Image: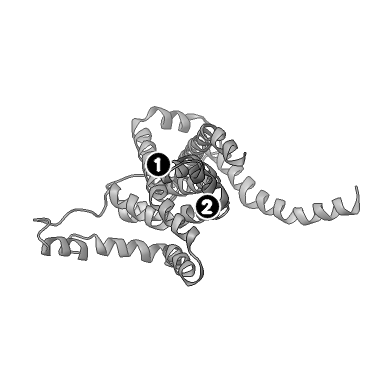
């Protein structure tokens, strides 16, 4: 082994150690815990079973919660994409002070603590909150709307905080598109819509792809926002997992739920990658 190779190996060891300690070991421990039996005086027993997975896969309640989590994550991802693309487009064209202000506005949701942000939504959407008071005062509604503890509010709050994770990679991809390509398409008779559809959108996909995956994974694994704004009225997989781990202390069942959620998330990401593989290749051509 050459000196350069040894040096690269030494530089990589800290990163490998961190991945092993904080990712491989916890996941391995969770997989092992998911096959443990339930304990009587402890969170888990000494023997092993596949009964937790059988229970999850055969119980319609868990399927319903999993489906709700998937639909919510997909809806949040789609809304973030629809909201973020026009913002990223304007950011890619901005320069100087305007660009700085746009970056600051986009990053502002991340500058507020998650609890403060969610309690703000709770105050705004309460029955006697500012939103209902305003709508009542304008005569738009006759009685207060029940917005708190609904799936719609959870989706709205998640979109509010996850938009920056979609805007920034799309903005970076749009900035890397050579203006000459757009000008060439226009000179060949393409109108604005055709130039966007055939040139800009495919070439911006390297920014859309990581944004979609990042927002989807963050949305399906979100816990604090669904727990506070969804409450007991709307159950999601992360809240169910935490309830099993910290509420009833049934660690094996909670671990099995976490593994099921992780596997389903990986399947969705893999399916999206396969379905968009040709588009990704086209964007690199």
Of residues 124 and 281, the one nearer the viewer is: 281
Q: Label 2 to label 1, Cα distance in Å?
A: 24 Å
Instruction: Please tell me whether residue 120 is drawn above or below residue 261 in the rendered image.
Output: below
Residue 236 rendering spot, x and y as whole percentages: 37, 44
Q: Which residue is mark 2?
A: 174
Q: Around disc 1, counting alpha carbons within 10 Å, would you say few (fewer than 14), some (14 to 19), or many (20 or more)?
A: some
Quadrant of the rendering where the C terminus is positioned? top right
Of residues 256 and 104, the one nearer the viewer is: 104
Q: Residue at x 42, y 29 (%)?
A: 57
Q: Residue at x 19, y 53 (%)?
A: 146
Viewed as shown, does residue 39 lie left or right of 61? right
Viewed as shown, does residue 218 lie left or right of 116? right
- Is residue 13 visible in this depiction of the protein? yes
Of residues 103 and 161, the one nearer the viewer is: 103
First in residue order: circle 2 vs circle 1:
1
Q: Around disc 2, counting alpha carbons within 10 Å, would you say few (fewer than 14), some (14 to 19), or many (20 or more)?
A: many
Q: Residue furthest bottom?
A: 97
- Is residue 43 visible in this depiction of the protein? no
Q: Which mark is residue 74?
A: 1
Q: Which mark is residue 198?
A: none
User: Helix or strand or loop: what does disc 1 sit on?
Assistant: helix
Viewed as shown, does residue 128 lie left or right of 56? left
**Disc 2 vs disc 1: which is toward the camera?**
2
- Quarter assignment of residue 112: bottom left
Q: Residue at x 49, y 69 (%)?
A: 100
User: Helix or strand or loop: what does disc 2 sit on?
Assistant: helix
- Quarter assignment of residue 123: bottom left
Total marks shown come to 2
Residue 241 rendering spot, x and y as whole percentages: 43, 45
Residue 164 rendering spot, x and y as whole percentages: 46, 57
Residue 2 rendering spot, x and y as whole percentages: 91, 50
């Amino acid at each position: 082994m050459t000196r350069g190779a040894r040096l690269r190996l030494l530089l990589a060891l800290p990163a490998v150690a961190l991945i092993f300690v904080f990712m491989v070991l916890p996941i391995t421990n969770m997989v092992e815990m998911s096959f443990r039996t339930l304990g009587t005086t402890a969170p888990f027993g000494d023997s092993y079973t596949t009964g937790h997975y059988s229970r999850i896969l055969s119980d319609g309640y868990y399927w319903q919660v999993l489906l709700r989590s998937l639909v919510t994550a997909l809806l949040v991802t789609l809304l973030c994409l629809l909201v973020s693309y026009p913002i990223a487009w304007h950011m890619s064209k901005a320069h100087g002070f305007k660009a700085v202000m746009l970056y600051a506005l986009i990053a502002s949701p991340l500058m507020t603590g998650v609890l403060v942000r969610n309690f703000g939504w709770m105050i705004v959407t309460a029955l006697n909150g500012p939103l209902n008071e305003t709508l009542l005062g304008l005569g738009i509604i006759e009685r207060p709307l029940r917005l708190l503890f609904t799936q719609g509010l959870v989706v709205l709050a998640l979109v509010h905080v996850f938009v920056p994770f979609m805007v920034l990679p799309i903005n970076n991809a749009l900035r890397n598109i050579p203006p000459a390509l757009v000008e060439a398409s226009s000179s060949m008779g393409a109108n604005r819509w055709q130039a966007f559809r055939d040139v800009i959108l495919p070439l911006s996909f390297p920014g859309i792809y990581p944004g979609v995956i990042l927002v989807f994974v963050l949305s399906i694994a979100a816990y604090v926002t669904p727990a506070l704004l969804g409450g007991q009225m709307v159950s999601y997989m992360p809240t169910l997992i935490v309830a099993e781990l910290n509420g009833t202390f049934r660690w094996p069942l909670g671990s099995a739920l976490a593994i099921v959620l992780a596997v389903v998330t990986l399947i969705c990401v893999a399916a999206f990658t396969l379905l968009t593989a040709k588009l990704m290749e086209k964007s690199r051509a």
